[in-house]
Image: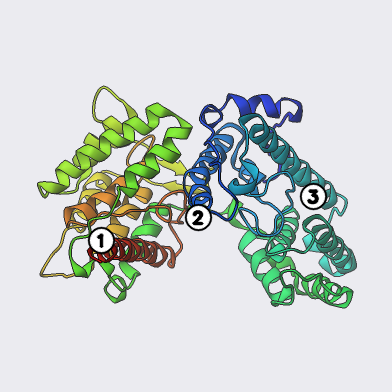
Amino acid sequence: MDPARHAFDGASAAQTVGSLGPARCIPVRPDVPFGDPAMSTWSHGQAKYWADAMSYALAQHYGRWAVGWRWAHDEGDFDGGPVGNWCCPQHSITTPEETLARIGAALCEWREWLEYLAGWFDAYPLDLSDIEDQRILWERAARNLIFQVVDRTGCGSGWHGHCHQVLTWFLDRWGVAPDVARGLVDEAIGGRFHSWTGPDTVVVDDVAEQLALSLQPADGRTRADAPAQDHLQRWLAIRESVPWHEITDSGTDGPVVPLHDGAADDIHSFDGAIDPARAQGLLSALELLRADAARGARLDFALLSSWQQHLLGTPQPPRFRNAPAFAKGSREHYGIGPDTRARFDTCLAESASDAARPLGLTARAARACLDVCFFHPFDDGNARSAFLALVFVLAREGVALDGVSLLRRITFQADEPQDPLILVRYINIHIAETRRRTADSTSSASR
C-alpha cells in the first residue's frame, strides 16, 4: 500500500478508468424505488459483480493498492473506510458518465489518503533499536494517527478496523515485523473502539501509551535476512495436518440441481465485464469440465491443462511450469523439483471418493482447489484453474451451485492452517443455500 512504490497520475485517472474493460458494460440501473426487491437483487448481483470486475481491472493496471477505492464511510461496500466519493452499487451506479466519474474521484481520494498517511509516518523517523529513548515519540505518533483516522472515517460502522490497519502500517514502516505489529495493535486496542462511537481521549491516550510501551528492539523484521520460504512445502505440511475428516460435509445428502447455473452466471457478470474473451474462455472450459465430470474422469494435470487451453486460448494445452513460481506480489514462492508434477497428480487423485479412506465431498473439493493454488502449475490463470477444479470435484458427484461468490475473488495463504477450514465452510454454505432455494421453489410450485 506504500504509495512510494506505485506511480500514479491523478490528472489522468478518469481517462484510465474510462479505458478499462468494465467501463464498456456498466450495468443499467432498474427503474424502481430503492425499497423494491428488484433493486436489492440488482445491487447484490449484477451491480456488485461489475464493481468487483472494476476493482480487478484497476488492480491490474495500478497495483493492489487501488482496490481501496470502494472502502466507503459507514455501511458502504466495506465498513468504516475513508472514501466519501463512493458508497455502494445501489447508490453509486447511476448513468455511465456519473458512475465513472465517481470511481475516478474515489480512486484519487483513496490515493490521496495513502499519500497523506505516508507523510504522517515520515514525520516521525523512528528507530526501533533506540526504543527506550523514543517511546514518547512512538506514543505521540500513534495518538495522532488514531485521531487522523477518527476524523477521516467519521467513526461510523467499522471505523476501528481501518484504525487498526493504519497503526499496523505505521509500525511496519519503521521496521516492526508485520505479524508482530498486528498482534501489538490488537493487544493495545483491546476491543475498546466501537462502531458509531468516537473514542474517548483518555482511551486514545491509553491505547497509544500501551502500544509504545509494548515495543521492543526484538520486534524488528528478520525475514529479509532469512532464506526464501518454499510455500509449496509449507502447504504440503499444512495439508497433512488439517483435520479434514472432522469437518461438516454438506455434500452427504446427494446430488444438488440448482435453479440456475451459479458458476456460469458469475463468469458472465464478473469475467465478462473484465474482458468478453476471458469470459468466453472460462465458459468453454466450464462446458468441457462438466462433460468430463459426467463421464467420471480422473482429475490430474493433463485434465486441468485441457481446460486451461480453452481458458487461456492457447494453441496447445499448457505445460507444467519448469521454474519456481511466485504469487501475491511475490510474497509466496512455490518451488520446483523433479517430482513436483508427479506429487501434484497424486494430490489431485485424492479428490475422488475412496471407500477405503472416506472423506467428505466438500473437504475434497476444497483441498483440490488449494492444491492447484499452491502447486501453481501454470504460468498464468492458476486462480481460475483452481476454481474449475473445485467445480469439477463437486460436479463429478452431481453437485452444482446457484452461487459462487464466496469461492472466487478471495485469497488464501499457503501457510495459514485455518484457510482450508474456511474454504470448506464457504462451500458448505453455498451447497446448503442452493438446496434451500431449490426446495423453496419446489414447495412454492406444488402449492
Residue 354 left/right relative to 344 = left
Give amino acid for label 1.
Ala
Foreground disc of the pair 3, 2:
2
* Pointers 3 and 2 in contact (C-beta within 8 Å): no
Distance of label 3 from label 2 (alpha carbons)? 40 Å
Distance of label 3 from label 1 (alpha carbons)? 57 Å
State the scheme by which the image is colored. Answer: rainbow
- Which of 172/56 is in front? 56
Q: Residues within 10 Å of mark 1 (few under 14, many from 20)?
A: few
Instruction: Give the structural element (helix, strand or loop) at label 2.
Output: helix
Give amino acid for label 3.
Leu
- Which of 214/218 is in front? 214
Distance of label 1 from label 2 (alpha carbons)? 20 Å
Q: Is residue 165 above or below residue 302?
A: below
Give amino acid for label 2.
Pro
Sequence-wise first label, 3 or 2: 2
- Asked whether residue 266 appears in the rendered view, the answer is yes
Which residue is tagged 1? Answer: 445
Residue 105 left/right relative to 273 = right
Going 22% across and 35% down the picture, which residue do you hit?
Answer: 306
Residue 65 drawn at (x, y percent): 64, 43
Residue 194 drawn at (x, y percent): 72, 73
Residue 151 left/right relative to 38 = right
Sequence-wise first label, 3 or 1: 3
Which residue is tagged 3? Answer: 117
- Quarter of the C terminus within the rendering: bottom left
